[in-house]
Amino acid sequence: MEDYGRFLALLASALLVGFVSVILSLVWVFHYREGLSWDGGPGEFNWHPVLVVTGFVFMQGIAIIVYRLPWTWKCSKLLMKFIHAGLNTIAMILAIVSMVAVFEFHNAKNIPNMYSLHSWIGLTAVIFYSLQLFLGFAVFLLPFAPVHLRAVLMPIHVYSGLTIFATVIATALMGITEKLIFSLKNPAYSASPPEANLVNCLGLLLVIFGSLILWMASRPHWKRPPNLSYLKSYRNPLRKMYHLN
Ligand code: HEM
Ligand code: HEM
């Protein structure tokens, strides 16, 4: 692999930044807010940021770059597809649970649903993400789609995947800002209390994590070579083509 050292440095930075983001979201809800619970109260709302940061941002980011880890290039493409699809499925489940938490909290407190730009963009991202997941399974994992259809759809899959990922990060930043404005009253957000600074740092880390993932996923020379493992494991060139995309 070209620039192996640089790839490793970026990967280690992304893992560190992503991991610290998850920890900061936990510190936020446990140290400054009401912790986690499932009773229609603020503790139920708190699952929302924790699960989206862990699943929808961190896990999705790892799922996106998993094909690019050079030590996996000797593994079969099918195995890597299971890992990529599996991580994205877990991220989807966590995103859905996080949405249930915020809707239940709103309903329990008689707060209107779906009024903010954050909620509109967020729900749109979740809908497109589930479509992407469904089409990914149908086209690239199940053995029905012809090779030429896979080839036509792959650039769209990559483009929409990266766009959804960037949109999820933008949604998280809107949600963080809203939550701080709603809940910091005395002292207010504008007085920069420690909670505000901590959570602003979380937002900054999410942007850095997103930038690192998008950079790694958009370098053509770090892409998984097309058919390395199939050259070794398949004799028939048609079967070799079969899992190409
Ligand atoms: C990144 C993925 C995220 C998605 C897809 C998302 C999605 C949503 C949706 C659909 C709602 C509407 C719920 C309802 O109307 O009952 C909502 C509400 C809310 N979310 Fe998020 N959210 C995300 C991240 C975050 C984060 C990180 C925070 C930070 C605390 C947050 C804070 C809020 C707040 C305060 C509300 C209630 C106010 C409102 O409806 O805008 N969100 N979110
Ligand atoms: C919402 C879920 C998904 C998202 C956000 C997503 C996103 C992406 C992205 C951004 C890439 C480009 C990675 C790269 O260039 O290295 C990619 C590649 C790929 N995805 Fe997905 N994907 C999803 C679900 C799936 C599913 C369910 C499958 C089925 C196995 C799948 C199969 C593939 C394949 C075969 C590649 C090409 C890997 C390569 O370049 O060697 N994806 N995906």
Image: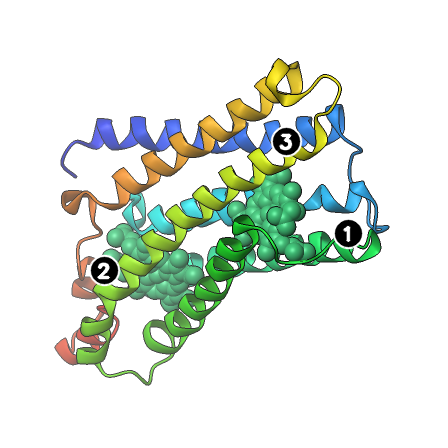
Amino acid beneath label 3: Ile
Q: Position of residue 52 (x, y in %)?
A: 57, 46
User: Which residue is drawn at the image coordinates 68% and 20% (left, top)?
Assistant: 188
Residue indicated by mark 3: 181
Amino acid beneath label 1: Phe
Q: Which mark is residue 105?
A: 1
Image quadrant where one finds the N terminus: top left
Taking the image as drawn, is residue 23 in sight? yes
Give ligand 2's quarter of the image: bottom left
Check disc 1: other Cα within 10 Å, few if <14, some if 14-19, many if 20+: many
Is tag 2's residue or tag 3's residue first in the polypeptide sequence? 3
Q: Quadrant of residue 221?
A: top left
Q: How is the image coloured?
A: rainbow
User: Which residue is drawn at the image coordinates 13% and 76% (left, top)?
Assistant: 237
Residue indicated by mark 2: 229
Q: Position of residue 219 (x, y in %)?
A: 18, 42
Could you tell me which secondary element the residue under label 1 belongs to?
Answer: helix
**C-alpha span from label 2 to label 1:** 49 Å
Of labels 3 and 1, the one closer to you: 3
Amino acid beneath label 2: Ser
Could you tell me which secondary element the residue under label 2 belongs to?
Answer: helix
Pick whichever, 181 or 76, lies toward us.
181
Image quadrant where one finds the C terminus: bottom left
Against 33, is 46 above or below?
Answer: below
User: Which residue is drawn at the image coordinates 53% and 31% (left, top)?
Assistant: 21
Taking the image as drawn, is residue 80 in sight? no
Pick whichever, 9 or 130, lies toward us.
130
Of labels 2 and 3, the one closer to you: 3
Task: Decide if ligand 2 comes within 8 Å of the CB at mark 2.
Answer: no
Q: Position of residue 29 (x, y in %)?
A: 71, 32
Against 4, is 167 above or below?
Answer: below
